[in-house]
Amino acid sequence: MKNNKKKGSSRAQEPQIAVNPEEERARAIETGDFSKFNDEAEALYEQRLRDLQAEADRSLPPDPDALLEVRHLKMYFPLKKTITGKVTLSLRAVDDVSFKLHAGETLGIVGESGCGKTTMGRAILKLYKPTGGQIFFDGADIAQYKSKQMRPLRTKMQIIFQDPYSSLPPRSTVGGILSEPVKVHAIVPKEQTKDYVLSIMEQCGLRDYYYERYPHEFSGGQRQRICIARALSVNPKLVICDEPVSALDVSIQAQIINLLKHLQQQRGLTYVFISHDLSVVKHISDRIGVMYLGSMVEFGSKKSIFSNPMHPYTKALFSAVPNPNPDVKMDRIVLKGDIPSPANPPKGCKFHTRCPVAQEICKHIAPKYREYEPGHFVACHCYPQEDQ
Amino acid sequence: MAKQDKAPAAKAEKNRHYLTGKEIREIVKENNKITKRLEKKKRRKASEAEFTSAMKDDANILEIEDLHSYFFTDQGVVKAVNGVSFEVPQGKTVGVVGESGCGKSVTSMSIMQLLQGPYGQIFSGSIRFKSYDYKLDEKGKPIPVMLYDEEGRPVMEIATDKRGHVILDKEGMPVKVPAQKRDAYGTRIFEMEEKVFDIAQMPTREMHRLRGRQIAMIFQEPMTSLNPVFTIGNQLDEVTFLHFPGSTPADAKRRSIEMLNLVGIAMPERVYKSYPHELSGGMRQRVMISMALAGNPRLIIADEPTTALDVTIQAQILDLLRDLKDRINGSILLITHDLGIIAEMCDFVVVMYAGRIIEKGTASEIFHHPMHPYTIGLQKSKPTMDSEGDTLFNIPGNVPNPIDMPDYCYFRERCSGCIKKCFGDYPPMIQVSPTHWVACHLYGEKEKSEYEEQ
């Protein structure tokens, strides 16, 4: 019975796409009267527009300067399926995210929990199979690669996880943990493995006699160093740092951040640095992307984002960071309410439910993700949506 | 000969990481002796005079003096809190800041007597708390405050039983009793009196009078501190039932909903009926705060209240705490590792390192004139929104092993400003201004005399 109802509703939607919503849209935007506006038809229309855009961009060649280029990346997780296996409801963890990252740079991704930043990092590494979109790594689209094809690429891209307490195997020694990837990918001849691992350990600030020790003998900061050494042991170009310092104390955080920066200069690494701590991201990044409910709401260089935050969410996020100066009283923008569920995101602009400057149009039409300054992308109705 | 020389050195090296079975048995025996004594002390029946004390300064609500809280493990005694003294003045916020393992949470647990026994014990010291408790009559029952009309006659009301049904006499007429005074939330008022208790000497049985009612605690992880099988309302009502004698279910519900309103929950009726898993992280923390407020506490201990929350939600919760402190005229003991939160919220700051206080003072003293190298390093190592520059200042090394603490300054190995004196005893607390204290040899007699000249 329930199933039939579902089918009925989906059938009822189909004719609505057939009516041309563009006229209605134009009229509604013009007059600001959204009383007769059909939000569901608009959602489908937007979906179709985005699919068309993704299809059009598909044939474009990748940017030769960029080490990593992500185009219209989508990562949906099925929540409900029909008996035949068709997905009727999905959680859009990452929905249409695009960016470019040059070699040797650091991209900081910030956002609240549940905004899809970790999922995006893992999807780039193909730890999840992306639902759609393209991921160009070194000029090759790896989005549709099979796991066998990915294997040689695993040496080029690595990840550092958030919790160093659960991401190290408790039963192998530090030497074992670090030499396993070296052996599997045959980075150096077998007999040189130990020397090579020791040199990596030295670079990461680990003493050579730690080689025989087990992870439980170390403190959080040292374990995170082991995780970093493990990621670097295969000579990667791109390292995805998934909240590498969130579980650490302030004084240890500084050690790890300095180590990451030092290694970047030494080895020319490219980082995607995922964190919810804005001050850390500001310190380490060259470019910053702000995510909200699976979409990128603002993207730009560190300088342009911090000197000129454009999206209201970015502004609120910046003002929410506590300032370690007791005399400064900040005019804080406190966002009301909680982050909505990504399984059922709000219609129109996803941020409109908490936005301090939301207008009527924000509740119905999603803003376009547009470039307002060179390299500075924003998705917000506060800024002109069409070229003038 | 060479062999002999080597052997003791090897043994000493071995001893540091490994204990023989015999050694462990000795430690356990010794520990059992101490913990049994302390447990017995907690279980004893004591008259109130035994744990009543007096405050040193009447403006304070809490005074901790030379507190030692130890954990008796099989590897040795962990001195998690090792001689901590500080005060919480009435109506102020005091922040305790430090890295993990520095003993800040153990201090707060000691105040609530929540250390996991028999291993965790308050070993010595005193925690004086000024409680505002019910005045008891000879039978040990609270004395109600009655309601009188303008002419001084007691106001009569219809008596109801616990379920809210009217009690009838033999003739079928409702029984009338003198009415009791009620506060704004409809809770019955009793006569109160001020008493000072020494929590370190209090038996656990007596502690129930303070916990939740006088001192409330907000925990770090709201999901694990709320019971998943009971509704929010059920858990909130419990506080009222426990701490307000004579409350009926209707009274409790009214009070709970008022409390949910107070913390800014939009639909308190709905939240009252829902289960913890149905709420988001920020909402759960609000419920935790409302639960803490339900007992009308004078002191709220917030143990990392926003660590598990997002930065935007954190801003909401901090705003709420600040607002509430003024409204209920209480004091807050805020425990956190985030210097930014401390700067925003606190009037006084206590910096802890490896179980000891290394610096304490007002917020502006600690942030504008930090003195201890650790405090300075901590502030420099945190990247801020305004800071520029390539490398962060970092404090080398780690916190020392808590089992065998050295007898010299715990920070010596990580300190950049070491002097000759640092190789001697642990530095005493040195007063550098009426409110500013620091435990560091760098600010010895010379600095002090300089200050006095000014």
Image (cartoon, coloured by chain):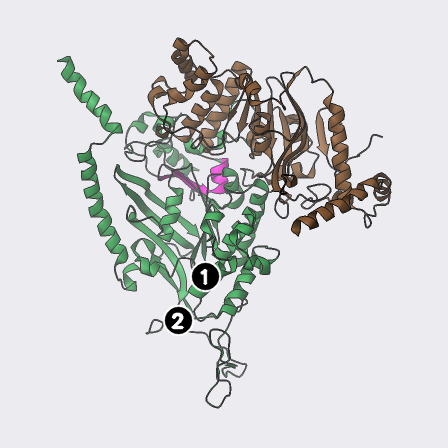
Chain colours: A brown, B green
Q: Is residue B149 above or below residue A3?
A: below
| Residue that carries the numbered disc 2 in the rendered image | B142
Q: What amino acid type should be assigned to the residue bearing mark 2?
A: Pro
Q: Residue at x 19, y 34 (%)?
A: B21
Magenta stretch encompasses residue B289: no
Instruction: Give coordinates of residue A302: x percent, y percent.
Output: 64, 26
Left or right: residue B42 compared with residue A78:
left
Specify the segment rendered in magenta.
B351-368
Magenta stretch encompasses residue B359: yes
Left or right: residue A328 compared with residue B294:
right
Q: Could you tell me if residue A34 is visible in this image?
A: yes
Label 2: few (<14), some or many (≥20) within 10 Å? some
Same chain check for tags 2 and 1: yes
Instruction: Give coordinates of residue B30: x percent, y percent.
Output: 19, 43
Task: Name the secondary structure under disc 2.
Answer: loop
In the foreground, B293 or A190:
A190
**Given the image, what chain letter belongs to the residue carrying mark 2?**
B
Check residue B239 in the rendering and tell me which mark sits there, or answer none: 1
**Given the image, what chain letter belongs to the residue carrying mark 1?**
B
Residue sticking out furthest to the left: B1
In the foreground, B274 or A206:
B274
Q: Is residue A114 above or below residue B283?
A: above
The C terminus of chain B - image quarter: top left
Q: Residue at x 37, y 51 (%)?
A: B111
Instruction: Give coordinates of residue A379: x percent, y percent.
Output: 72, 34
Instruction: Give coordinates of residue A212: x percent, y percent.
Output: 33, 21
Q: Could you tell me if residue A369 is visible in this image?
A: no
Q: What amino acid type should be assigned to the residue bearing mark 1?
A: Val
